[in-house]
Image (tube, rainbow, N blue to C red):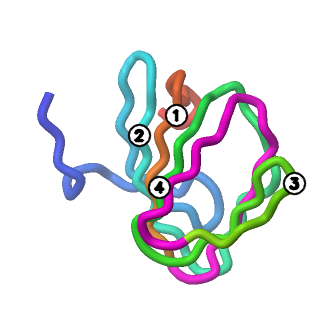
Amino acid sequence: MNLNLSNIQSKEIMPGYHGKLVHTETMSLVFWDVEKDAVVPEHHHVHEQIMHIIEGEFEFTLDGETKIYHQGDIVPIASNIPHSGKALTPCKLMDVFSPARDEYR
């Protein structure tokens, strides 16, 4: 399979979070375009996650600790750890999840 990001249809997974998704059997990759001030409420999931800030400033709370992340920052998120976030500017983020996020298919 050969994919190109420009050919993947974007889905609004939650308000202000527009994702282009790629799935394999064991993981999901999401390229997000996030609107300024869009919020991800606190949640947790069984999936391990790695978040990469491609562009913008993103306020992120992981297990009760809040930091502001910038272009190039990478945040590993262990399984079942509470986390939330807010885009302080328009952002481009990339998330990798394992196992695959079947609810995003």
Q: Secondary structure at mark 3?
A: loop
Disc 1 marks which residue?
A: 97
Disc 3 marks which residue?
A: 64
Q: Is residue 47 above or below residue 69?
A: above
Query: In front: 3, or 58?
Result: 58
Ranked by sequence position, the earlier of labels 1 and 3 is: 3
Q: Residue furthest top?
A: 25
Please name which of the two marks, 3 or 2, marks the residue nearer to the observer. 3
Spatial CA span between label 4 and label 3: 19 Å
Q: Secondary structure at mark 1?
A: strand
Spatial CA span between label 2 and label 4: 11 Å
What span is in magenta?
70-90
Q: Residue furthest left?
A: 2
- Give left or right: position of 99 versus 87: left
Disc 4 marks which residue?
A: 52
Q: Secondary structure at mark 2?
A: strand
Confirm whether the magenta stretch covers residue 77.
Answer: yes
Please name which of the two marks, 1 or 3, marks the residue nearer to the observer. 3
Please name which of the two marks, 2 or 4, marks the residue nearer to the observer. 4
Name which residue type carries label 1.
Phe
| Residue for point 27% across, 49% down | 8
* Residue 88 x %, y %: 63, 81
Ranked by sequence position, the earlier of labels 3 and 2 is: 2
Ranked by sequence position, the earlier of labels 4 and 3 is: 4
Say if mark 1 contacts mark 3, CB within 8 Å.
no
Name which residue type carries label 4.
His
Query: In front: 40, or 83?
Result: 83
